[in-house]
Amino acid sequence: MHRITRREFTALAAGALAARPALAQDEAIIMRAIPHGGERLPVVGLGTAAVFADDDAATRDAATKVVRALVVGGGRLIDTASVYQDSETVIGKAMAATGLRDKLFIATKLEAYEGDEVLRRSLSRLQTKQVDLLQLHNVRDPAQSLGRFREWKAQGVCRYVGITSTYHDYFDAVEAVVKREKPDFVQIDYSIDNRLAEERILPAAHDAGAAVLTALPFGRARLFGTVRGKNVPDWAAGFAGSWAQFFLKFLISDPRVTAVIPGTSDPRHMEDNLGAQRGRLPSPEERKRMAAFVAAL
C-alpha cells in the first residue's frame, strides 16, 4: 500500500485547505519556559532527520528557505544530529547564507561512542563555536551518564544538555536516566496516535524539571495518510486551520511539552506548522475529542 506523503496530501487537499480561514498571524506566539533556567522558546521548531541528508545545491536552497521561514514566522529551534548524514553541514551553510545564527536555538546530538573529535566536527559543520543544546542520542542503557556532556557545558561548548530516544524498547532506560541525571532536555517521539511517552517519560521529565522536545509529531507522515480526503472537523476550526496544526496543537496542549520539531524541507509546510504556535490551544475536553476522532479513523 502506498503511504501518502505530506507533499501529496497537500496537493490533494489544497482546495479544502484554501477554503478554511487561516489562524490570525497577529496573535501572540505561544512560548514555553525551559525549566532549568527559565529561558522561553517558541513551541514550534524544525527537525532535520532525512530532510537535509545530502549537501547538494537543491538541498541547500531548500534549507535556506525553510530557515528563513522559521525565523520570519517567529520560530527559533532547529534540531539536528551528528549521524543525520549531511544535515549539520546543510544547516550550517543555511545559517551562514542567511546570517540568522543569533536568532536561532541550535540543538545537535552525539552518540555515546562519539567524543571530542566528533563534537569539534559538529561545531565546524554548523559553523558555530557553541550550540544551544547538546544531546546524548539514542539512550539505551539505564546506567548511561551525562558527565561528559556536563563537562562540555562547563567549557562553554553548549548551554544545555539533554538525552533522546525514539525507540520504545529503551524507554525504561530513558526513564532511569531522566530520574538520575535530571537533564535539561528530553527528546522523545510523541504524536496523537503514538502516546506511549505519556505513561512514564513525560511524568519523569516533569518531575526532573526537564524540557521536552517531541520528534515525529506526524508519525513519519502516517497521520496525513489517515486523514486523506477528510477536512479538519468544524469543532476544531477555532484552534486548527490545517491538519498539521491539528496534530501539532494536540501535542502543544500538553503543558509538559516544550516544543514540537516536525521535519520539513518545504517552506510552505514550515509556515503551516508555525501556525500551530498561534491562537488558542484545545481544552482538555477537546484534546480527548481529538484523540478519539483520530483513533476512530
Image: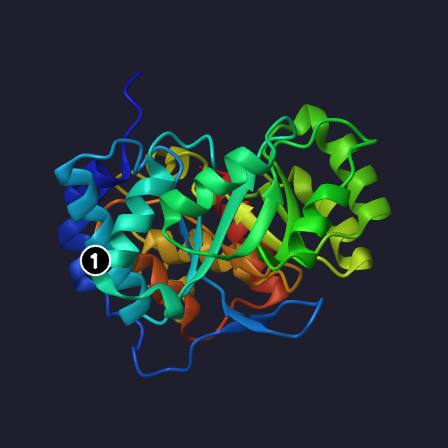
Name which quarter of the figure residue 67 lies in.
Answer: bottom left
User: Which residue: 26% across, 44% down?
Assistant: 265
User: In which image quadrant can residue 165 be found?
Assistant: top right
Residue 252 figure quarter = bottom right
Task: Please name the amino acid that badge 1 sits on.
Answer: Ala
Q: Tell how many labels.
A: 1
Q: Counting other residues with Cα less than 10 Å from the Cα at mark 1, is it few (<14), some (14-19), or many (20 or more)?
A: some
Taking the image as shown, residue 93 lies to the left or right of residue 124, namely left
For the question of whether residue 159 can be seen, the reply is yes
Instruction: Pinpoint residue 148: horizontal percent, then vertical percent.
Output: 72, 42
Identify the residue under disc 1: 97
173 horizontally vs 8: left or right: right
Residues 83 and 30: in front is 83
Q: Is residue 26 above or below residue 202?
A: below
167 or 121, nearer to the observer: 121
Q: Residue 215 in the image: x percent, y percent?
A: 51, 43
Q: Residue at x 72, y 33 (%)?
A: 171
Farthest residue, direction top: 1
Q: Quadrant of the C terminus?
A: top left
Q: Nearer the viewer, residue 110 or 165?
A: 110
The N terminus is located in which quarter? top left
Provide the secondary structure element on which disc 1 rests.
Answer: helix
Q: Nearer the viewer, residue 247 or 130?
A: 130
Q: Position of residue 7 (x, y in %)?
A: 21, 40
